[in-house]
Amino acid sequence: MIALAPGLIWRPAYFSREEQQALLDDIRAVLRTAPLFTPAMPRTGKPFSVRMSNCGPLGWVSDRDGYRYQSRHPQTGAPWPAIPQRLLDLWAAVAGYERPPQACLVNYYHPAARMGLHVDGDEQELRAPVVSVSLGATCLFRYGGARRADPTRSLKLQSGDVIVIGGASRLVYHGVDRLYPATSTLVAGDGRVNLTLRRISSGD
Ligand code: MD3
Ligand code: FE
């Protein structure tokens, strides 16, 4: 495990290939109930290149009306499926937070998809970390400081890597600049799946 900054812990190759496959199977089951949707930027309605879904009591969505957590899928209206046990176990092992996650955001990247620099600040309980799992194609990940203009560092995240983002790093800017083709056979078509476990509120 490598401390990239205070509160920002990288655990390369946390999951074996077999565990990665099992996680991906869990997520495929989630997506049968809660299909990927295309989020849009608030106000402009510009579509994201990343498609998303969620599991857990709450899910993160974005559309013209803004960013928010809600209990139902924006298209089907159904409650999100439960967070798979394997991911609850991961949180218990690495989060250092007494209560379970309330949301797991599923990000699907096609080979040309990107995620611009942003801060994850929609959660009320900022004492809880965000726990991220990368599956599939290697990506170039970038993180900086508390201000958008702060200098940034880049890091290649590989399939099976886990990052815990907490403490002094919980509100730093970060994004995904690009994917690298032919770096993993886990996700068909050189795609990438990122899972982020989140706690939204301190209470129920
Ligand atoms: C590092 N996801 O879903 S990993 C997101 O790879 C998101 O799909 C990226 O940013 C992805 O919001 C990055 C998760 C992550 C989340 C917050 C961070 C990494 C972070 C905050 C600071 C540094
Ligand atoms: Fe983020």
Image (cartoon, rainbow, N blue to C red):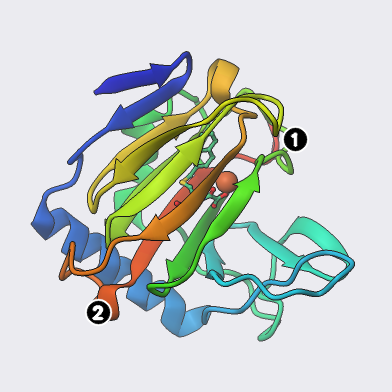
In the rendered image, residue 153, in percent from the top left (x then y), is placed at 45, 30
Report the mark closest to the observer, 1 or 2.
Answer: 2
Q: Residue at x 64, y 25 (%)?
A: 150
Q: Residue at x 28, y 21 (%)?
A: 2
> Amino acid type of disc 2?
Ala
User: Camera-side residue: 196 or 185?
Assistant: 185
Q: Residue at x 32, y 30 (%)?
A: 10
Q: Residues within 10 Å of mark 1 (few under 14, many from 20)?
A: few
Q: Residue at x 44, y 72 (%)?
A: 112
Whether residue 20 is visible: yes
Whether residue 56 is visible: no
Looking at the rendered structure, the secondary structure element under dot 2 is: helix
Q: In which quarter of the view is residue 193 placed?
A: bottom left
Q: Dot 2 corresponds to which residue?
A: 188
Q: Quadrant of the C terminus?
A: top right
> Amino acid type of disc 1?
Gln
- State left or right for residue 6 relative to residue 93: right
The reply to whether dot 1 and dot 2 touch (C-beta < 8 Å) is no
Q: CA distance from mark 1 to mark 2?
A: 36 Å
In the rendered image, residue 201, in percent from the top left (x then y), is placed at 70, 37
Looking at the rendered structure, the secondary structure element under dot 1 is: loop
| Residue 19 drawn above or below residue 130 | below
Q: Dot 1 corresponds to which residue?
A: 124
For label 1, being within 8 Å of ligand 1 is answered: no
- Chain-order first, disc 1 or disc 2: 1
User: Camera-side residue: 203 or 162?
Assistant: 162
- State left or right for residue 60 relative to residue 186: right
For label 2, being within 8 Å of ligand 1 is answered: no
In the rendered image, residue 130, in percent from the top left (x then y), is placed at 51, 37
- State left or right for residue 26 relative to residue 57: left
Q: Quadrant of the N terminus?
A: top left
